[in-house]
Amino acid sequence: MRKDVVAGLDLGSGRITCLIGAPDADSQRMTVLGGSSAVCRGINGGVVVNIPETARAITRVVEEAEASAGKPLVTGLYLGMRGAHLQSFNNKGAFNIARTDKEITSDDVNSVVSNAKAIPISPDREIVHVVPQGFSLDRQPGVHDPLGMEASLIEVEVHMVTASTLALNNLSKAVSMAGFEVIDPVYGLLASAELLVSPEEKDLGCVLIDLGGQTVSLGVFCDGSIRYSKELSFGADLITRDLAVGLRTSYPTAEKIKIGHGVAHPSLLNGDDEIGYVGIDGRSSSSIRKRAMMDFILPRVEEIYTLIADELKRSSYADMVVSGGAILTGGGSLLRGSIEAARQILEMPVRTGTAHPDQIACDEKWLDPAYATALGLLQYSTARHWSESGHRVLGRKKPVWLRRVSSMFKELF
């Protein structure tokens, strides 16, 4: 059994997804071995609202992923996060090299980055990521990797992501109760961006839109790095809710109708067939025509992308992403016509964010946008695996049988 098997656990808006993979020493890329996904009512907008229910869902999803991967043991777990409790901003740092030898070392780079993040933040928040955007050497900007170069003054611009301490603690408690430990909490947007956004797009300027059920994650890239990120407290579940209310049916039925028959752009409406469905009582039958169903879907789709466009304008980066366009991913992007609707409302090129087979080895089903963050977490772990010595992997806290017994006792007492 391999000891370097890792798992990416995406705690999304209201769904948990786990993919298990192993780094390939020859190709230095991740091979996906298996995965699983399930709805979880213990999570709302990326925040845990019921720890025991979330823990049970995590246990079930990871064990199903293990079974599909043929591996009974996960040796590492990267936790993907999203939600309004995550906040980000840009900052700068500087470091003087006082040595006679002015050649920049990794310690110098670490020092300037540490200075950039040495700012007062609220005691109820924690720094999750500090992403270098670019370096300046002796006031000359445009340096991406200063190692080995010479300078007296090194400066850096960074993108910082902070999270609510309480939200992080609740996530950790749910994972711990499920019987696992976390290698790293990771902002899901940054993880998926490493997989979905090409270096050329990062240079030219683009926006990554992760359309989840209850949240939307925005990431603006230009000049080779992330410049702006934002979590918006709405998502594609609003469309499902409108359908459920309008059709007087259950939420799962409305979701099934939305994905199976709905379209997000009128140009894709083909015919006016009648769609049958079961009412909210689970027994009565009803029906609606496709054109009538569009009255529930299209206004909400327009509202969602209009709010995204408004947020881009407020970010002051809107003009920088027009050329590269938008990359649309996440489960909410599965609604047919989402690309066309986004292209019309955002007024820029839009493409679906899909991982390239050369980046990660997996079955085609895992390339679905709904798995983008979990795939990105595996890619994130690959980068750490090959770039860090003494890579620390925290394994499962308890074997399967002990974890199940512990869960039973926790529920009894």
Image: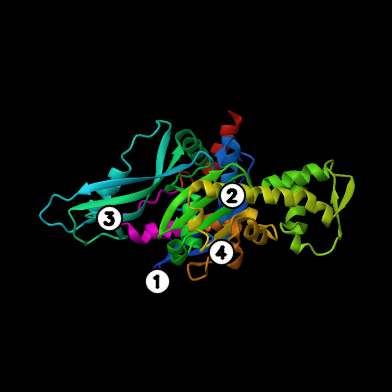
Q: Is residue 30 magenta?
A: no
Q: CA distance from mark 4 to mark 3?
A: 34 Å
Q: N-terminal of the two: label 4 or label 2?
A: 2
Mark 4 lies on residue? 354
Mark 3 lies on residue? 136
**Residue 348 x, y percent position in the rendering:** 58, 61
- Residues at marks 2 and 1 touching, judged by CB atoms closer than 8 Å: no
Q: Is residue 249 visible?
A: no
**Residue 21 x, y percent position in the rendering:** 49, 60
**Residue 75 x, y percent position in the rendering:** 44, 53
Labelled disc at residue 364: none
Mark 1 lies on residue? 26
Q: Please tell me which residue is depicted at 59% across the width and 53% down the height of the picture.
A: 64
**Residue 190 x, y percent position in the rendering:** 46, 53
Mark 2 lies on residue? 308
- Residues at marks 2 and 3 touching, judged by CB atoms closer than 8 Å: no
- Side of 124 where 100 appears, left or right: left
Q: CA distance from mark 4 to mark 2?
A: 21 Å
Image depth: mark 4 or mark 3 in front: 3
Q: N-terminal of the two: label 3 or label 1?
A: 1
Q: CA distance from mark 2 to mark 1?
A: 41 Å
SS for dot 1: loop
Q: Please tell me which residue is depicted at 57% across the width and 55% down the height of the picture.
A: 65
Viewer-nearest residue: 175 or 378: 378
Occupied quadrant, residue 115: top left
- Residues at marks 4 and 2 touching, judged by CB atoms closer than 8 Å: no
Q: In the image, what residue type sits under mark 3?
A: Ser
Q: In the image, what residue type sits under mark 2?
A: Ile
